[in-house]
Image (cartoon, rainbow, N blue to C red):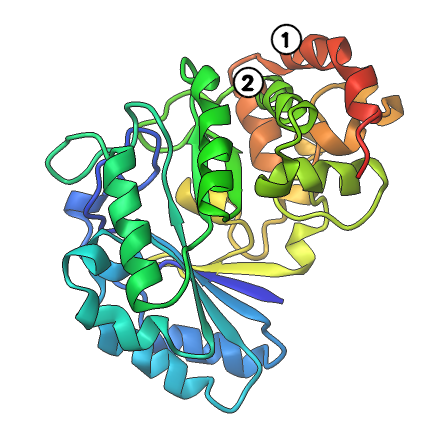
Amino acid sequence: MDLIIKPTELCNFKCTFCSSTDIAEDSTSILELDVIYDFLDKNPDTNTIIVNGGDPLMMPPAYYWSILDYIKDTKTTVSFTTNLWPFYVKPEKWLDIFKHPQVGVNTSFQYGTGRLKGDYTVFTEEDFWGVSDSMLKYVGYRPDFIAVVVEGEESLAIKNVELAKKMDVECKLNYAMASGDQDKPLLLASIYRIYLEIYDRGLGKWEYNTKDIIKSINNEGTACPRNRTCEEGIRCLQPEQPQYTCGAFADDKEYPIGESFREDLNLLSMTDSCFTCPLFNLCNGCAKTIKDHKRFNMQHTHCFEMKQIEKQLLEMNE
């Protein structure tokens, strides 16, 4: 079991694709520590506490020291996903937590105009190098990073992977979902064309999902967003509405524990013909993605586009 926690929905960035942007300024609620402790007591086999938000560094370090003290005699680890800007500005505030043996840190960046700092200026490559250099200097490593691909900026996606190669880290290219200010998802087939380009250019070593696609094609265990058994292995705690299975649905305040999205027949597949298609695992892992595509009547366009690259996808191997 893994646990996603969103201690706060507050964020110091104003990214256009993020579910937190339109609610962060009005949100003062925090996830109470007792809610986390109660979950850990009931699930002592929790592997990783994945901390996101909002941005985790909007909370005081004492919040995380409390969690680390609670799990100090366990094998549970803590994984932060943060823009790291507060660390860049004041590294001494976070240094001891980031160097803790049970803590790992990931960050985020992408080329384009969607990732905005608090003053609504673009978070640039120069900014990102500054953040990464600070982590290397003070913590001892450069963090892997997530990049979100949005409509209209697909051509920039490959640059993120080239940057990951230059930094010798791993990039995870995620597609934009319909949440917050992002009112429409990226067509899923669009990002599969990008993964194919990454594979063909020999850049797969530096991009997480390109490697995971191969596992999915071979019917091996995969991670979000291609895992159809995610309800069995993850939970999400956040302010006000404490417990969900899926972090993406939690952003929309849908499908709390007890209301299984896997029991919603409309979310089993993009189309009725999917169940006999060799690409089934690639298109139908994420129920949130299925819901977004059906909501905007994009599922048939996605299917048509995937059929154009079916042969190339199925020929991907290590």
Cβ atoms at labels 2 and 1 below 8 Å apart? yes
Q: Residue at x 77, y 11 (%)?
A: 307
Question: Which quarter shows the N terminus?
Answer: bottom right
Mark 1, Cα crowd under 10 Å, few <14 / some 14-19 / many 20+, is few
Specify the quadrant of the image occupied by residue 33: bottom left
Give the left or right position of residue 154, taking residue 96 as reference: right
Q: Residue at x 27, y 50 (%)?
A: 131
For mark 1, give the secondary structure: helix
Mark 2, Cα crowd under 10 Å, few <14 / some 14-19 / many 20+, is many
Give the left or right position of residue 242, taking residue 225 as reference: left
Give how far across and how far down residue 79 sits, in percent: 46, 64
Which residue is the site of mark 2?
Answer: 187
Question: Whole-Å distance between the Cαs marked 2 and 1?
Answer: 8 Å
Give how far across and how far down residue 125 sits, in percent: 29, 34
Q: What is the residue that sits farthest to the left in this orientation?
A: 119
Q: How many discs mark residues in the rendered view?
A: 2
Specify the quadrant of the image occupied by residue 211: top right
Residue 272's disc number:
none
Tell which of 91 and 181 is nearer to you: 91
Give how far across and how far down residue 216 sits, in percent: 77, 39
Residue 301's disc number:
1
Amino acid, disc 1: Thr
Q: Residue at x 39, y 32 (%)?
A: 179
Tell which of 316 and 55 is nearer to you: 316
Give how far across and how far down residue 113 sits, in percent: 28, 23
For mark 2, give the secondary structure: loop
First in sequence: mark 2 or mark 1?
2
Question: Which quarter shows the C terminus?
Answer: top right
